[in-house]
Image: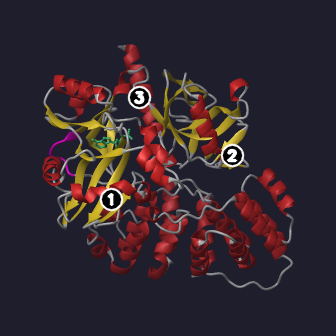
């Protein structure tokens, strides 16, 4: 297929933010795509080349792209950088520069989608000495044959800046319409996605085998399942309003969620965002098989750092010392962990997702052989508010964050957040009612003790509807010197020449970052703000929400991706809650 079929559709999608229009364009594109390459189209429109859990990253730096544009156009890197500084979008800048060149050349090969995809895949696999030059050559060879519009989108995909506002939900709607003529089949598409975490694969099966094909998607080993998520409650009373009967109260541990896949002695771990994290936990790979009395299974557990002498849980940040490329063995011995099981999703070649919570828990209790390394998350059945308070206190005294309250007869609802799991955290008793997970998008240079580091950070929530990061506050308190050093180091690798187009801000930061790093923040209040963009127009026209007296809790949420940050609706809910309690 000609790459221009895709790039023309992308161009149309770029000019609209309306979900219905986006869906229509996507349906049209999918209908015009041959089944054999449908998965490639699905990955590319999401700005990727493989499903997330395979960890295939393009990660091309702006500098390299500028060099490639220069090579293809004969225009100096300096001129390209200047244009980029004026224009704001390197994809567009590149296309404009290359347009000038195209006018003077005669022949160019038509480029196919297959060629672009295969080249991107090759680029992603290059590493080590000489790889930067090779990448540059590959990019430049594509640009030599691409039209300006094609170049723009190739560049955007390479840079990771293709933001069309096509959420996964829209893609699933379009798949259902394009291949089954029925939007109502979207639920079946979603079910297949929930157990495979691979929309490319779902689309390919749908295009070749139709609806019967996707009905065959089942839970399978080493293919991650989209995690079930919890809604929040702020008090025991609130919990009983949402769950009418007895329910299970489990400790909410403060660590990293791991989906553990086991087949005999083969172990693979996926994070909450379905990244393969096996390499960070060689001790789990080595020891966990002996603690699981089953040949195969998919389990969920919270991995928590512990004090080796006392066995006490340590805060989440301790665990993040393991997120390193080098000297991992040292980190494994310096930061010991326990694996705390709380669910089983597959066992003995049987899917457990539809089984009720209590049956899954009993199965887990039968399978897990507890020792110093592997444990079951403590659970008790609660039937009144007093029981919940007692459990909450016990959990907090053991160094946990609070409770996870689970409906006893509920199945495991992969990929959904709802009332079958509720989280009740200790912080809920503080002024705001909850902490927020916010994305660092920019910074202001520090003075005094903080000279040379970032003194104040600019933070954003996530707007899932528009796939953007609207700002919500600046934060400068709660940081220790160690935090400042650590953040400076992490953020230095995320600096961009200008504001990322997905960031919505009226403030001009001294420095901008790729919106990637998530921090946990508490605050005293949510106020209305003409400056910040979170929840814009939700309460009043042209007015958003801001946090008053925000403070960093010390927790860098490295396990969360920017899209897992608190969403505008959560901020709105907290704002309304606060209004209610002001009135009481
Ligand atoms: P939050 O990140 O605040 O939305 O809380 C949900 C997270 O709590 C999950 O993704 C898990 O990592 C973690 N967690 C800790 N203990 C449990 C538990 N007993 N059941 C489920 N999730 C848990």
Looking at marks 3 and 2 on the same chain, the residue that comes earlier in the sequence is marked by: 3
Q: Which residue is mark 2?
A: 499
Q: Secondary structure at mark 1?
A: helix
Query: Label 3, label 2: how many angstroms apart (C-alpha)?
Result: 29 Å
Labelled pair 3, 2 in contact (Cβ < 8 Å): no
Query: Image check: 541 left or right of 293?
Result: right
Which of 578/488 is in front? 488
The stretch of residues the image draws in magenta is: 406-411
Whether residue 42 is situated above or below residue 313 in the rendered picture: below
**Camera-side residue of 347 and 180:** 347
Circle 1 residue = 286
Q: Which label sits on residue 434?
A: 3
Label 3 element class:
loop
Residue 296 in view in this figure: yes
In the picture, residue 414 is in which quadrant?
Answer: bottom left
What residue is at 58 percent from the left and 56 percent from the top? 163
């Amino acid at each position: 297929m000609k790459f221009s079929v895709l790039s023309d559709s992308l161009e149309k999608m770029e000019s609209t933010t309306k979900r219905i229009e986006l869906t229509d364009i996507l349906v049209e594109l999918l209908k015009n795509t041959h089944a054999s390459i449908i998965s490639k189209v699905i990955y590319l429109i999401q700005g990727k080349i493989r499903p997330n859990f395979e960890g295939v990253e393009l990660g091309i730096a702006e500098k390299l792209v500028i060099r490639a544009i220069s090579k293809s156009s004969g225009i100096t890197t300096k001129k390209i950088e200047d244009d980029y500084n004026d224009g704001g979008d390197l994809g567009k800048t590149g296309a404009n520069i290359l347009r000038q060149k195209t006018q003077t050349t005669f022949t160019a090969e038509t480029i196919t989608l297959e060629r672009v995809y295969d080249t991107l895949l090759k680029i992603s696999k290059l590493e080590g000495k000489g790889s930067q030059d090779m990448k540059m050559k590959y990019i430049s060879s594509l640009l030599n044959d691409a039209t300006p519009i094609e170049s723009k989108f190739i560049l955007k995909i390479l840079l990771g800046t293709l933001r069309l506002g096509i959420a996964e939900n829209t893609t699933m709607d379009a798949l259902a319409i394009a291949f089954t003529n029925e939007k109502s089949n979207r639920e079946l598409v979603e079910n297949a996605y929930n157990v495979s975490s691979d929309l490319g694969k779902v689309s390919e099966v749908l295009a070749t085998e139709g609806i019967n094909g996707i009905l065959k998607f089942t839970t399978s080993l080493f293919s991650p399942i989209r995690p079930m998520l919890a809604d929040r409650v702020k008090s025991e009373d609130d919990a009983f309003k949402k769950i009418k009967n007895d329910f299970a109260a489990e400790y909410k541990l403060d660590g990293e969620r791991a989906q553990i896949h086991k087949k005999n002695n083969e172990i693979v771990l996926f994070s909450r965002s379905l990244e393969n994290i096996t390499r960070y936990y060689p001790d789990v790979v080595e020891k966990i098989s002996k603690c699981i009395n089953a040949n195969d299974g998919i389990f969920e557990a919270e991995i928590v750092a512990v004090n080796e002498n006392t066995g006490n849980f340590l805060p989440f940040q301790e665990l993040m010392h393991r997120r390193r490329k080098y000297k991992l063995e040292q980190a494994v011995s310096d930061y010991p962990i326990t694996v705390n099981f709380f669910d089983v999703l597959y066992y003995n070649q049987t899917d457990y997702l539809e089984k009720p919570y209590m049956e899954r828990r009993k199965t887990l209790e039968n399978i897990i052989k507890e020792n110093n390394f592997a444990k079951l998350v403590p659970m008790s059945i609660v039937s009144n508010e007093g029981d919940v308070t007692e459990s909450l206190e016990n959990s907090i005294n053991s160094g946990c964050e609070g409770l996870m309250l689970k409906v006893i007869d509920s199945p495991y609802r992969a990929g959904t957040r709802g009332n079958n799991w509720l989280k009740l955290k200790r912080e809920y008793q503080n002024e705001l009612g909850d902490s927020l997970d916010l994305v660092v998008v920019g910074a202001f240079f520090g003075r005094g003790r903080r000279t040379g580091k970032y003194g104040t950070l600019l933070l954003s929530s996530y707007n899932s509807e528009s796939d953007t990061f609207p700002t919500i506050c600046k934060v400068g308190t709660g940081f220790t010197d160690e935090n400042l050093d650590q953040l400076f180091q992490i953020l230095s690798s995320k600096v961009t020449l200008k504001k990322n187009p997905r960031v919505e801000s009226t403030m001009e930061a001294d420095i901008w970052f790729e919106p990637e790093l998530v921090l946990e923040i508490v605050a005293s209040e949510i106020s209305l703000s003409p400056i910040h963009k979170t929840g814009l127009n939700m309460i009043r026209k042209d007015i958003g929400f801001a946090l008053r007296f925000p403070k960093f809790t010390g927790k860098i949420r490295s396990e969360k991706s920017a899209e897992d940050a608190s969403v505008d609706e959560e901020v709105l809910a907290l704002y309304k809650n606060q209004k209610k309690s002001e009135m009481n």
